[in-house]
Image (tube, grey):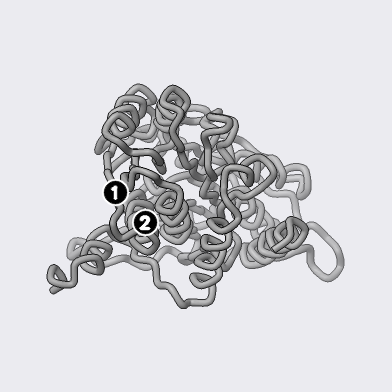
Amino acid sequence: MTAERIVRGALAAALALLAACGGDKDETGSRGRSVRVGLVLSSGGRGDRGFNDAAIAGLQQAARQLGADTAVSESGADESSPAALARYAEQDRDLVVGVSFMASAPAFALAGRHPQTNFAVLDYSPVTDSLGRAMPTPPNLAGVTYRSEEGAFLAGALAGLMSQSRRVGFVGGMDAPVIRQFEAGYAAGVERVCPACRVVVDYAGTTPSAFNDPARGLALASAQYAGGVDVIFHASGGTGAGVFRAARESGRWVIGVDVDQYDQAPGRVLTSITKNLGVSVQGLVRQESTGTFRGGVISQGLADGAVGWVYDERNRGMIPAAVYNQVETLRQAIIAGLIQVPRVPEEVAAKADPASAP
C-alpha cells in the first residue's frame, strides 16, 4: 500500500466517521444554528498530549467551522467533573460533553434533571441498575464508546513481531474496564503473532489519580525494562509521561495511545494507537447545530476510522516492511470481521489455554 493510498484511506475513514456522528452540511449548505458547548476534561486536564488535548482540538475546529460558542473546564480533576457538567447545564449550554468514562454516571443523572440540554460522554461506560444491568441512556445523552481493543490488538501484534526478548509490557492508568479493554486487545495481538511471548502487566492505581502520575509511570516502566521487557504499550493518560521517560533512558521501544505521541520519545515510539476524539466532538457539535442530535450508545472502531495506528515518515524506518504488512493484514481482517478481538483479559487467557475455559 502506497503512502498516498494510506492517506486517502485515512481521510475517507475520517469523513465516514464525521458523517456517522452528525453528517456534513445540509443540502442548502447551511452550517446550522450557532450552539453553546461546554467540554469537561478528565484527569490530566489541558496539555496532557493525549485524550483531553484531542477533544479540545476537535472543539476548537467546531468553533471555527460551525461558529460554536465553546467553553472548556480547566480543572481536569475528576472529582470536580460532576460540578463542571452541572455548571454548564445550569448555564443553559446546548451541549455538554464529558471526556472520559468517569463522566458517565454524572451525565446520566444530569440528563434526567436537564431535559432541554443534550449531553455526550466520550468513552462512555454504561450506567447499571442495582442488579448490574446496563440502563438505557436518556434520549438527551449520547454515549460514544470506542472499540479500543481493536487498536490495542495491532499494538500487541507490532510488539510481538518487534520484540527480541519475547517479553513485552503493558502499563495502564486506573485499573478499570475501559483500560482493561486495551490490555485484552494488546495481549490477544501478542498471542496472535508470538505465542511464546510473555506480557507483563502493571496498573498505576485504582483511582482517577492513576491517570496523572508520571513518577509512578516511570517506576513501573523502568522496572519492566530492567526485567527484560523491550516494548511497552501504555494506556495511562498523563502517567504515560513517565513511561516515555523510561523508554528514552533505557533505549527501549514504547507505543503511545490516543494521539500520535512520537514527540514524547523521538526514535523510541514505534507507533501510537489513536482515537479520533476530535472527529467525534466535531460530529456531535454538528448534530447539535443542525438539530439532528440523537441519544444512545454509539460504538466506533477501526472500520469507522475512530481507532487506528500511526504509520508515517517518522516511524516507518523503525518498522520493517514485512512487519508493517503483517500488522496491516490483521487490521483489514478485523475490519472484515474475520478476527473478533476480546474485550476483557479473561477471554485472552481462556483462548490461550483451552483447559481454563469453562
**Residue 314 location (% of width, % of height):** 66, 40
99 with respect to 314 (left or right)? left
197 with respect to 232 (left or right)? left
Q: Residue flagged by tag 2: what amino acid is it?
A: Val
Q: Residue at x 71, y 47 (%)?
A: 62
Q: Is residue 156 above or below residue 214?
A: below
Instruction: Give the quarter of the figure containing the N terminus.
Output: bottom right
Which of the two residues, 25 or 151, is positioned nearer the viewer here?
151
Which of the two residues, 63 or 16, is positioned nearer the viewer here?
16
Q: Are marks 2 and 1 in contact (CB under 8 Å)?
A: yes
Q: Residues within 10 Å of mark 1 (few under 14, many from 20)?
A: many
The residue beneath circle 1 is: 199
The outermost residue toward the right is: 28
Q: Residue at x 54, y 45 (%)?
A: 271
Q: Secondary structure at mark 1?
A: strand
Q: Residue at x 63, y 63 (%)?
A: 17
Q: Residue flagged by tag 1: what amino acid is it?
A: Val
The residue beneath circle 2 is: 190
Can residue 278 be seen here?
yes
Q: Secondary structure at mark 2?
A: helix
> How many marks do you count on the picture?
2
310 with respect to 301 (left or right)? right
**Residue 348 location (% of width, % of height):** 27, 63
Q: Is residue 69 above or below residue 351?
A: above
Can residue 82 be seen here?
no
Q: CA distance from mark 2 to mark 1?
A: 8 Å
**Residue 136 location (% of width, % of height):** 37, 68
Ranked by sequence position, the earlier of labels 2 and 1 is 2
Q: Residues within 10 Å of mark 2 (few under 14, many from 20)?
A: many
Quadrant housing residue 324:
bottom right
